[in-house]
Image (cartoon, coloured by chain):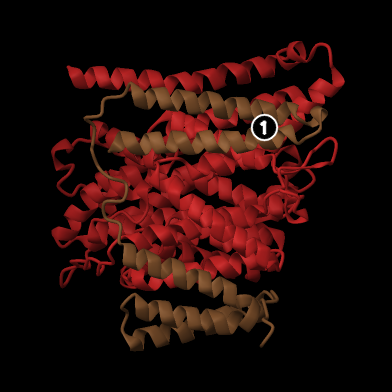
Chain colours: A brown, B red
Amino acid sequence: MQKNNEYILSGVFVVISAIYGLSILKLPTEDTLYPKFVLFLLIVLTIVSFFQTYFSDDNEKAEGLFKDFNVKQFGTVLTVGIIYIALINIIGYFVSTSIFMLSLLILLKNSKKTSIIVTIVFAVFLYLVFKMFLGVPLPSGKLF
Amino acid sequence: MNEIINGFGNALLPINLLAALLSVATGIFIGSLPGLSAAMGVALLIPLTFGMGTSTGLIVLAGVYCGAVFGGSISAILIHTPGTSSAAATALDGYQLTLKGKAKKALNTAVISSFGGAMISAVALYLFAPPLAKLALKFGPAENFWLSIFGLTIIAGVSSKSVVKGLISGALGLALSTIGMDPMSGRGRFTGGSPYLLDGLPFTATLIGLFSMSQVFILAEKKLKKMAKSVIKEGDDEGLTIKEFKMILPTILRSGVIGSVVGILPGAGGTIAAFIGYDTAKKMSKNKSEFGKGSIEGIAGPEAANNAVTGGSLIPTLTLGIPGNSVTAVLMGGLIIKGLQPGPDLFTVHGTTTYTFFAGFIIVNIFMLILGLFGSRHFAKIAKVPNSILIPIIFALSVIGSYAIKNSLNDVFLMFAFGIVGYFIKKFGLNAAAIVLALIIGPIGEEGLRRIILMYPDDYMGQLVSSPISIVLISISALSLISPIVLNIIESRKEKR
């Protein structure tokens, strides 16, 4: 199990090296020296890591990386998060953040009372700190 | 000397005092929450420092750093869960004292030792940073190239469980650092044709993604639990007596020195310092049998050491631009965004800012002492915020933080993407700090190498190894690569016996 993860990692680095190497080909020759040096490091280290895994004993902890992975909860956070970021542009930062906070808090099984209080306190905090104190312009959407 | 005194004058301005107080409180809070790290806190707060003056902003970052390192001990002592990894050694004896109904004594010992350790490291900061910065004046392109190589090798040695994984993280960071304009020709490279990436990866957004957003995903994948309750007993309000203070004083001084030295060594960090501090305290103690059963020396040893790392680790960061651990890597990002390049200029051109920052470092720790002595219990109460509330808050803060720098939603998308990358980095045991380090020092090394080749097209190899400083840097780079491997072999032989 442990070993498989390591092989996956080596595979990922083979892909990264390949993409990086192909991008170097597109550069004019005089600009390629340093990127080639970096590519060389990537390739050497990928090979070393592959052989290190290959020759290691597999009887170390046979523990899966995703043993305690809670798919539903992780999926909820990821989905609500992506919708939130997509919405900022449309309905503006404050509205989308408040909707995001409230829905995610409730979906993560906080009580309704707690969720509402946290959302309001957080919105007030953001407004005071960013708008009043720091004067950072916050993303405004097309609608608000 | 004048600059040092001026620094204190500036640091005592009301706005700086307020910044110090609030940032320490924030730091203690972040540190005491298991699952939130000092690096995460500093990354999230960098955008907040944008609207502030340079010195005030730096004081805020130092406050969060120092506060978080101490804060980790509160949950270590009260609920046997170190809030930060550097407080793991503190949990050994700290929790035993809580069980015996001496939580207050344990917390007081922790904060007094933390303060003592930090003060010793402040002395080291004042003494060693300026001369080391002068050395940096002698660095030409060749030395800069080797310095960046050295920076990468050290973090590989101690960072992750495997040297190869540390190095490969560094190489990935180097590859990422080449995105953007070519430093010599000015042509865009690896940008995928997008003008957005011409200036390189936006640093703060990348940091927030790697350190804060990734933590959201790490927290989200585990089943949410109710936080463990602390077991402070009724009538537990016995503090540290003068006699006990005298007993732990030698331990504080010793661990303070250990922590400062470990902090200066780039690559090592609070966790290692704390365990060395604990071990040494045990070896030198008259009451060895008390260790593990609730010895106050067992708290003073690691706590003085891990807080001494804060000042020590600032030395290579500010002078050579090599941050030794993830927090200082993030902090250095903050410095650069503020237009301060580590090196001799910090002590001449920007002397006032730098010495205000140093004085601020001391003031921050004084506030930490006061807050710790009188407020640890209250922090312990707030520190029970469950992950189900933390997840949305950190998510939303990461979004606003990455947006605020350039008012760009592209930065938010990039931050989110690096959050996912950072999640897999943690999962596969790679090292986010090594990536950030490579992002910072990669361009320095690249420019050094390119300059040398431009200046001496026929003899660049010879020029690269011509100066004594270069040779020293090459030797210590080799040493820092070999030493963890050798140490591993020695350790495995010991185990076999």
- Answer above or below: position of A81 versus A14: below
Whether residue A62 can be seen here: yes
Q: Position of residue B479 (x, y in %)?
A: 50, 18
- Dividing the picture into quarters, in which one does residue A113 lie? bottom left
Q: Is residue B92 left or right of residue B383?
A: left
User: Looking at this view, is B222 or B497 the one in front?
Assistant: B222
Which quarter of the image is occupied by the C terminus of chain A? bottom right
Residue at x 46% of width, y 83% of height: A119
Q: Position of residue B261 (x, y in %)?
A: 47, 33
Which quarter of the image is occupied by the N terminus of chain A? top left
Q: Position of residue B356 (x, y in %)?
A: 67, 54
Residue at x 33% of width, y 54% of height: B110
- Answer above or below: position of B39 versus B429: below
Residue at x 69% of width, y 14% of height: B468
Q: Position of residue B158 (x, y in %)?
A: 43, 32
Q: How many marks?
A: 1
Residue at mark 1: chain = B
User: Looking at this view, is B64 or B153 the one in front?
Assistant: B153
Q: Amino acid at mark 1?
A: Pro
Q: Is residue A41 left or right of residue B54?
A: left
Residue at x 61% of width, y 64% of height: B412
Q: Which residue is mark 1?
A: B131
Q: Estimate how packed mark 1 is, as few (under 14), some (14 to 19) or many (20 or more) residues with alpha carbons within 10 Å.
A: few
- Answer above or below: position of B402 versus B479: below
Q: Is residue B34 left or right of residue B317?
A: left
- Dividing the picture into quarters, in which one does residue B497 lie? top left
Whether residue B246 can be seen here: no
- Answer above or below: position of B8 versus B127: below
User: Looking at this view, is B91 or A60 the one in front?
Assistant: A60
